[in-house]
Image (cartoon, rainbow, N blue to C red):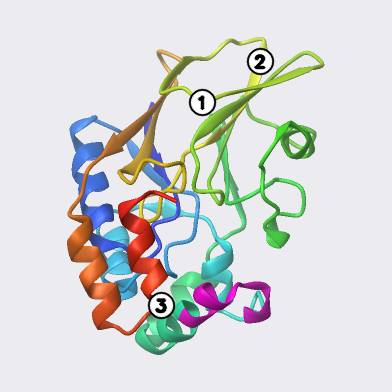
Amino acid sequence: MRYGLFSDVHSNLEALEAVLKAVEKEGVDQLLCAGDLVGYGADPSGCLSLLKEKGVHSVCGNHDAAMTEKLDLEWFNPQARAALEWTSKQISPMERTALENLQFVWQNGDLTLVHGCLHEPEQFHYVLNLSDARESFRLQETPAVFIGHTHSPGIFIQEGTGFSFQRISEWLLNSRCRYLVNVGSVGQPRDGDPRACYCVYDTQTRTVQLRRVSYPIEQAQAKIRRAGLPEFLADRLAYGY
């Protein structure tokens, strides 16, 4: 089974289109998204429509939860809050219902999908270091868990009682280990690389590949500015922070 995984689309239609085009060339069997379909960007409905059209199965991110009153807007910084208030006025009742129906955790025999940490997934804890990763590993039931939320790709590894972190583009999974894979961000990367990020997980070859793809950033920036959203949300796309 080959999975195409990504996260943190954040209403960036140009980035999402580029990622889906790249993933389709990978010959994946299923598309999965680790949440935050909306927020920050200027194309919430366009992104939700495309994700539905492509049959992408998603879990709930904190920005998605804020659209359904599962999470208070006071949780967010001023720029994020302004974008969410704007987004709330743009999406349809049907789109809001779709966001409300997203699960916090999804799991099958191959993997688990969650936005942040498996520990209190509805609280959207960040996995930023080995200590955070241990909290998630403690509850992990599948060989690999795929997350987003930090917008920074990388792989946490548990081997016995040891834990490590690798920021590499490809990894061969060891059956003696468990893995917590951050698939980065489609719509707003924050690791210094502005290209959209996605992941391919092949259960037959036991490989995880973190990929990057360029997209027309200027178009996404122009839409953000035309919508009257905070200038910072447009500027940061060019720098990947």
Three-letter code for the amino acid on which mark 3 is drawn: Pro
Mark toward the start of the polypeptide (3 vs 1):
1
Q: Is residue 226 left or right of residue 147?
A: left
Residue 97 point in image, percent of width and height:
47, 78
Q: Which residue is mark 2?
A: 177
Classify residue 178 as left or right of residue 217: right
Which residue sits at x=23%, y=30%?
A: 27
Sooner in the amino-acid sequence: mark 1 or mark 2: 1
Q: Residues within 10 Å of mark 1 (few under 14, many from 20)?
A: few
Residue plotted at (18% across, 64% down):
219
Could you tell me residue 223's position as x and y percent? 23, 74
The secondary element bearing badge 2 is classed as strand
The crowd level at tag 2 (other Cα within 10 Å; few <14, some 14-19, many 20+) is: some
**Residue range corresponding to the magenta coloring:** 73-82
The total of numbered circles placed on residues is 3
Q: Amino acid at mark 2?
A: Cys
